[in-house]
Image (cartoon, rainbow, N blue to C red):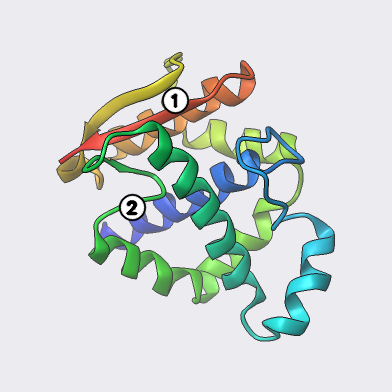
Amino acid sequence: MKESYLSTLLQLRLIVGFLGERAQCAWWPTAFYEASSRQFLEPVFPKTFRLAQYHGVLEAARRVHDEHLSVGSYHLFRLPEEIEQDLHAIVQSSVGEELASQVSRGKEAALDALNQLAAPCSLSSVGPTAVGKIKDLDSSDTLKAIAATYLSAFTQNEKTYPYLMG
């Protein structure tokens, strides 16, 4: 169960990270998943360019979320250290490679993938939005609520910052 929820969490993080970039919904001013970024990153990080993409988007998204949320809350891009380490390990695995390669297939494909992860109900909210407690992060309901909140915001051209309480 743990690996399943972690790969879903990573997939969610990659999709939202991609959709938040400037070419899609412009929540943060990065372009790590544009085709040209590979040409820029590969000479510098020849064996780990996907990891560089991931960490670039992760840091940009983390900063934007942190600006809108209170200190001490968790969100998709700032999780407890143990979970961050597990996600980092998965990014470097074949599972992470596969998930990362699927992400940059385009905005519509990413929205479809996010829709697959989202709860069927429409959670429409703008700004900071509590979606549960950090202890429930491994619950599929919590992951679906996070996905649904982002999906609603991306499709309605709004910005939301779902967070988990400690």
Q: Which residue is mark 1?
A: 149
- List x then y, in percent, for residue 148: 45, 26
Q: Which residue is mark 2?
A: 5
Task: Tell me the kind of residue under disc 2.
Answer: Tyr
Identify the residue shown where x is 63% and y is 47%: 18
Q: Is residue 60 above or below residue 39?
A: above
Identify the mark nearer the N-term, 2 or 1.
Answer: 2
| Left or right: 109, with 1 as reference point | right
Identify the residue shown where x is 42% and y is 58%: 7
Identify the residue shown where x is 55% and y is 36%: 114
Q: Residues within 10 Å of mark 1 (few under 14, many from 20)?
A: many
Task: Tell me the kind of residue under disc 1.
Answer: Thr
Q: Is residue 76 above or below residue 33?
A: above
Question: In whole angstroms, how far apart are the C-alphas of marks 2 and 1?
Answer: 18 Å
| Left or right: 137, with 127 as reference point | left
Q: Nearer the viewer, residue 44 or 124?
A: 44
Q: Quadrant of residue 24?
A: top right
Q: Is residue 12 visible?
A: no
Q: Quadrant of the C terminus?
A: top left
Q: Nearer the viewer, residue 10 or 70?
A: 70
Per the image, label 1 sits on a secondary structure element best described as helix
Per the image, label 2 sits on a secondary structure element best described as helix
